[in-house]
Image (cartoon, rainbow, N blue to C red):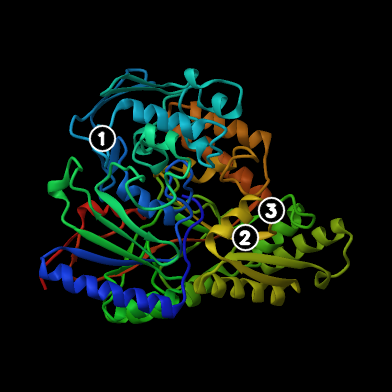
Amino acid sequence: MKKFLKQTIALSAALLSFSTVGSVLTTVSAQDEQVLNLAIGSEPPTIDPALATDSTSGAIIKNVFEGLTHIDAEATIQPGVAESWEVSEDGLVYTFTLREGATWSNGDPVTANDFEFAWKRVLNPETASQYASIMFVIEGAEAYNSGEGDADSVGVKAVDERTLEVTLANPTAYFMDLTSFYTFMPVHQATVEADADWASGAGDNYVTNGAFLLSEWNHNSDYVLVDNEAYWDNENVALDVVNVQIIEQESTANAEYQAGNLDYLGAPYSTVSLDAIDLYRANGELNTAPYAAIYWYKVNVTDEVMQNANIRHALALAIDRQNLVDNITKGGQLPAMSLVPPTVEGFEEDPGFFGDADFEGAKEFLAAGLEELGLSDPSELTINISINTSEAHATIAQFIQEGWAQNLGINATIDNTEWQVYLDKVSALDYQVARLGWIADYNDASSFLDMYRTADDGNNDTGWGNDEYQALIDGARAETDADARIGILKEAEALIMGEMPVIPIYFYANNYVLNPNVQNMSPDALGNIDLKNVSLSAE
């Protein structure tokens, strides 16, 4: 999942909000309600499933909407709105039967038409969904999105109110995983068509179908989720209220956790601050879980300097990743010299496309790049590192900045921007080198590689494209033999690493701490937490 994490309010405002939450807690405790208190690092850029691209937005959407299926903590596909499904022998046609009890928050039944409308809305080029390409496994989807086809040719059809038929372009092993992802959530057609701003805030107009309702959203301050009594599986939802404060600084969130004002720190909410890792590890509170995610620096290859492949390779080789994860992040992360995390099946071993901290090799690439740019000395080169506002990202950027200066003689500057503005900036290619993270949308290598299939893919954000690479990705999509498919994806990974439009830094480990009274709140390998499964035990 795109671009993750960390942002947004002043400490005084945060403390004021927590004071308010404290009074709420006093009231609800008297009523024996279960109240979970969380923080998240930024204002969610959107709560529209068709437009979301980041984990901050997803943290709301995944809990107020429900797709055909959901993935449990053991990475098993479970029925959601769909109570059952059948797959044709050739693996192309999926027929979903929707449950009768699924309803929208306004009382309307959730129908197959809601899914057909929602998916075609994502693909409609006028929607400008950056995640539209994730649906290209569906027959006719890419043609419609590119303007070369029409909506009627897309292989999504509501046969009747409770039957949804989906026809794929090729057999796709991970398709069922996609049916739980937020881009594939249904939306209420009448609501969406009646008001373009339907997803701008909380209230009755934000019609959803998940286990929780968005009852309050004070922009740049906090939001509140409450138990959805109309949800079909409501009897198995324990939490009554989830208070989520928006706190930009990890250290502030950490202080609030230590003060007992928060119940959890970790993905997909606020992260454990770098300066607290050792403390939590020493006292036994730190939990570490596998994570199919990567921290990387994307490179704008349309930039006059960064279009030079030798310069990109020089920057990649001149980072001491082992030192970074050992002494800066300190959370069990692994140095990354490739793009696909070792948690992904078939990619368990890092192929090492380049050497970590290979300073001599970096200098050779730099010399070649400077000559091609008509420069005589590294000091003539200035690289700007863009980050979203975060103590952790700033610390990592400073480490890399110092390494480039010391080992290459390159000047590097750092600029930081709040999350939503930052996402817009990166998407517009208004940067040279930009920090981003990517969590797998589904546990498959294609989740890390498909976004670079073409330069104009909504999540590419580098300006890089390669016809041979596109052919490999298309070949992998059409390949039905699992081992052969992995082989093709490995070829694609090797090709993109040979051109380096993305500089891998490290593979994440999911570090988190939680109140011992909180039950069933451990993130899965994709960093997801389904709040419908969370409960609080008596103290």
Q: What amino acid type is highlighted by mark number 2?
A: Ala
The label number, if any, that marks residue 434 in the structure image: 2
Residue holding disc 1: 81
- In this rendered view, identify the residue nearer to me: 218 or 241: 218
Q: Considering only vertical position in the picture, is 120 above or below 8?
A: above
* For discs 1 and 2, the disc positioned in front in the rendered view: 1
Q: First in sequence: mark 2 or mark 3?
A: 3
Q: Considering only vertical position in the picture, is 61 above or below 8?
A: above
Q: What amino acid type is highlighted by mark number 1?
A: Val
From the viewer's perspective, is 267 left or right of 36?
right
Q: Could you tell me which residue is drawn at 28 percent across and 37 percent down?
A: 69
- In this rendered view, identify the residue nearer to me: 406 or 181: 181
Question: Which SS class for mark 1?
Answer: loop
Mark 1 is surrounded, within 10 Å at the Cα level, by few (under 14), some (14 to 19) or many (20 or more) other residues, namely many
Q: First in sequence: mark 1 or mark 3?
A: 1
Would you say residue 281 is visible in this rendering? no
Q: First in sequence: mark 1 or mark 2?
A: 1
Residue holding disc 3: 300
